[in-house]
Image (cartoon, rainbow, N blue to C red):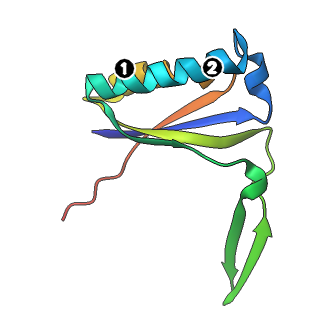
Amino acid sequence: MQFMALIYSADGAEQNYPGGPDKMMADYYAYTEEAKKAGVMVAGDALQPTSTATSIREREGKTSLTDGPFAETKEQLGGYYLLDCKDLDEAIKWAGKIPTAKYGTIEVRPVMIWDQ
């Protein structure tokens, strides 16, 4: 089963990471290698800051563009891992190892599989 681990944190919150941002990046590299070696990592990427986002809405045939993310919240989506795990328990175990879990939030959701 595939699970999306969505990584949320407040802008600048990485400063609160135990050991600081450099330690956080080292831990991300280590986590990514561990997940690859275990065969659970399908994909993963970090996103550019929310200031680079554009939200698109279509209402009554009219399209509008707004700079920034869809919602104003303290925590913003900063990246993701697509994990291939046997079940939700295993996905939660792997998601809990993502470094941002120490200062932000990791949301785990099963990926919808459409029958062909």
**Residue 69 in view (yes/no):** no
Which of 24/108 is in front? 24
Which of 78/34 is in front? 34
Q: Residue at x 37, y 47 (%)?
A: 111
Residue lying furthest bottom in this view? Answer: 61
What's under tag 2, amino acid-wise? Met
Q: Which residue is drawn at 80% across and 31% down?
A: 12
Q: How far apart are marks 2 and 1 (CA)?
A: 15 Å
Q: Residue at x 79, y 69 (%)?
A: 66
- What number is the disc on residue 34? 1
Q: Residue at x 60, y 24 (%)?
A: 25
Residue lying furthest left in this view? Answer: 116
Task: Relative to 51, say whether 64 is above or below.
Answer: below
Q: Give the residue pinned by disc 2.
A: 24
Which of 22/39 is in front? 22
Q: Relative to residue 77, is residue 94 drawn left or right? A: left
Q: Relative to residue 3, is residue 99 drawn left or right? A: right
What's under tag 1, amino acid-wise? Glu
